[in-house]
Structures are given as C-alpha cells and as structure tokens.
C-alpha cells in the first residue's frame, strides 16, 4: 500500500474520478478490451492498479494474472504460462475452467460485478468466496464500498494486523476488515486510519487533513430516482445514488408501519417526516460510511428543520444511515447527547 497523500481531499478526488469513469452501469457493459489490454491506460484494470495507486497500492503484486485474464505483451505473446490456460494472445486463471478467452472474460466480469454488489451492501463474507485473486478483488471492493474497507490489501500486513486484534493469521479478509472497521476511531478517515498502520510497518505518517461535505438542496418529490448516476462528493460516495436508495428503502418501511398518508418525503427539505397524533418524527438520512459521519453531517440540518417547523406537537429527531454504529460511533453519539444535553437517535437502514 502507498502512504496516503498529504492532501486528503486529493485522495478522495482520485476515488471520485475512478467512480466517474467506472460507474456500475459502465462496468456491466464493458468489453474485454475495455477491461484489460496492452498499452491502454484507460482500461478498468489500469485504473484499479495504476490510476488509483494512492488509494492502496497493488501494482506489480502477483502479476497480471490477478485480473483473472490478461493480454500478453508482444514480447511474450508466444510464451504461454504453464500455470494458466492460454490462447494465442490471452492467459487466464485455470480455476475459471474456461475454454476460450470470451468465457474467461465473462467469468472475470461476473466476479467483478458480484464484488461491487457485495461491497455496496456490506456483505464482505460473500467476497471471500469469489474466485478472483484477493489482492485485486479487495481493491475493487474498497473502491465501491463507500469507504467501508480499510485500503490495505497485502496479505502479510493484514496477517500482522489480524494478530494485533486477536484474530488468527489465517482469518479471512472479510473478518480482518470488519475487525478493523469496528475499531476505527470516529474522528479518522479510512486513509488516516490506514496511515497509522503504514507508519507502524515502516512508512511515514502523513498529516491529517479535513474534508468538508455539503448536502444538495432538493425540492419536494413523491419518488426518488434510484438509477445509476455519477456523483462526485467530498467523501467520494459510490456512483449509485446511495442516499436516494436509502431514502426509498426507509420510506417504504415507514409506510408499512404508519400508513402512506402519514409519511411525507422532502416536505420543507426534510428527508422524511412521519405524522402521529402525539408527535412528529423527523428523519435526516446520510450516506456516510459510518454512523458518526452521518451524525456529523446531519445534526445541524435536522435541528434547523425541527426549529423551523410550526407544528406544536413534540418532535422526535432521528438520523439514519446504512450501517450500524460501532463502539467508537456509540462513544461519539453519547458524547454529543451529553455535551449538548440533547436527545436524538440513530437508526441504520438495512439494504
């Protein structure tokens, strides 16, 4: 892994550029030449390995076979590696059990798509079982995980980290990443957190950098678009409109519980309001990868919305995000409640 850049905003911009170039719908349609080639810096594999090197360095590790299939250079065109399956131009993993480059690419592409889908919803255990090389599939998983994976991919580093946290060295990648996430301090980005391990294992610590995020004002609507879109943000959200998906999911859940007539979406900019005889529920939804991040982004907004509302019924304020809070998130939540003498709750939205 490369040490994160001094300017953390630039690191996040690298992730945004990657997701701009390779949103999920583009990955679904990519051809073999777009996936991997020789001399083309714009392939998917070149972006993952080279253009996002500051988001975790996998360059040169394992070799080109980590992509599942690769095109041999002109110099090595006639050298067919014995450990792989080959045709006149391409080599691919034997574990694919593919007879042609077309079959091998479809398998590799399907593995990439599954990796993205699993990373997007936080199902890391399922990624362990995919056939692609670990060093590559976990870099891909990180890029589409909304920063829910720590950008460290070398197995020897991860084994030492696993031992540090009381795990067996042969623990699966998913278990190590989940353990790392559960111990990530709420005030550190994943890059700053990873740099602590970089420093310990021989690199140099880079200065902390702040990232500012802001919410886009939206007019009242009845339905939200959940189709794939490119979205560049300071915290580099994944290309799909995660906020809208979370909002639709929560809206449907609340309608089922309280009835459609009692659930309002985006009235006076409030993500969701639930009307009851004795109180009003205000929901502010954030797509940050961590509960503490959602709270930091949402707290001022939800207070302002509640203050501006003229209804005299008591107001229950709820901040919602995709993931359950870890121990450090809970420390932050309790601190905010105590220091502000203010009661609110956090709920996770299970996708």
Image: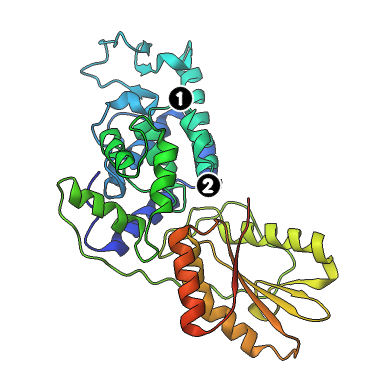
Whether residue 142 is visible to the viewer of this picture, yes or no, is no
Mark number displayed over residue 131 = 1
- Other-residue count near label 1 (Cα within 10 Å), few / some / many at <14 / 14–19 / ≥20: some
Q: Position of residue 247 (x, y in %)?
A: 65, 62
**Looking at the picture, how far across and down is residue 180, in whole percent?**
38, 48
Counting residues from the start of the chain, the first of labels 2 and 1 encountered is 2
Secondary element type, mark 1: loop
- Say left or right for 75 vs 255: left
Q: Which residue is drawn at 21% across and 64% down?
A: 207
Q: In this view, does 135 lie above or below 234?
A: above
**Is residue 56 rendered to the left or right of residue 134?**
left
Q: How far apart are marks 2 and 1 (CA)?
A: 19 Å
Which dot marks residue 228? none
For label 2, the crowd category at 10 Å Cα-Cα, with few meaning under 14, some 14 to 19 and many 20 or more, is many
Pick whichever, 220 or 123, lies toward us.
123
Question: Residue at image x 64%, y 84%?
Answer: 306
The mark total stands at 2
In this rendering, is residue 267 above or below 56? below
Colour convention of the picture: rainbow
Q: Which residue lies furthest to the front in this view?
A: 166
| x then y, percent, for residue 201 | 18, 45
Looking at the image, is 289 positioned above or below residue 210? above
Question: Which residue lies under the disc numbered 2?
Answer: 120
Residue 249, given in percent of the width and then of the height, sits at 69, 57
Judge from the rendering whether residue 113 lies leftward or rightward of residue 177; answer left or right. right
Q: What element carries label 2?
A: helix
């Amino acid at each position: 892994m490369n040490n994160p850049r001094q300017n953390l905003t630039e690191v996040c911009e690298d992730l945004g550029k990657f997701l701009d170039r390779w949103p999920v719908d583009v990955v679904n349609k990519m051809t073999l030449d777009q996936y991997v080639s020789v001399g083309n810096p714009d392939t998917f594999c070149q972006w993952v390995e080279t253009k996002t090197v500051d988001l975790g360095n996998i360059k040169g590790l394992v070799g080109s076979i980590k992509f599942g299939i690769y095109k041999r250079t002109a110099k090595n065109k006639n050298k067919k590696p014995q450990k792989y399956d080959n045709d006149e131009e391409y080599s691919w993993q034997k574990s694919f059990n593919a007879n042609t480059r077309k079959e091998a690419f479809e398998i590799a592409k399907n593995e990439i798509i599954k990796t993205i889908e699993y990373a997007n919803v936080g199902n890391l255990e399922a990624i362990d079982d995919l056939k692609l090389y670990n060093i590559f599939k976990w870099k891909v998983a990180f890029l589409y995980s909304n920063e829910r994976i720590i950008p460290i991919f070398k197995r020897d580093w991860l084994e030492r980290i696993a031992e540090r946290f009381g795990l067996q060295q042969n623990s699966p990648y998913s278990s190590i990443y989940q353990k790392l996430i559960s111990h990530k301090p709420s005030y550190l980005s994943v890059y700053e957190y990873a740099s602590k391990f970089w420093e310990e294992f021989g690199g140099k610590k880079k200065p902390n950098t702040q990232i500012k995020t802001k919410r886009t004002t939206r007019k009242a609507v009845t339905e939200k678009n959940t189709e794939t879109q490119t979205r560049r943000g300071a915290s580099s959200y994944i290309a799909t409109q995660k906020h809208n998906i979370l909002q639709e999911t929560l809206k449907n859940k609340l309608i089922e519980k309280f009835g459609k007539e009692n659930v309002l979406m985006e009235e006076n900019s409030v993500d969701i309001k639930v009307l009851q005889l004795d109180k009003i529920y205000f929901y502010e939804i954030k797509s940050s990868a961590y509960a503490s991040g959602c709270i930091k982004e949402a707290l001022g907004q939800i207070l302002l919305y509640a203050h501006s509302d003229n209804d005299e019924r008591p107001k229950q304020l709820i901040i919602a995000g995709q993931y359950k809070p870890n121990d450090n998130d809970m420390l932050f939540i309790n601190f905010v409640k105590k220091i502000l003498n203010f009661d609110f709750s956090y709920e996770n939205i299970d996708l």
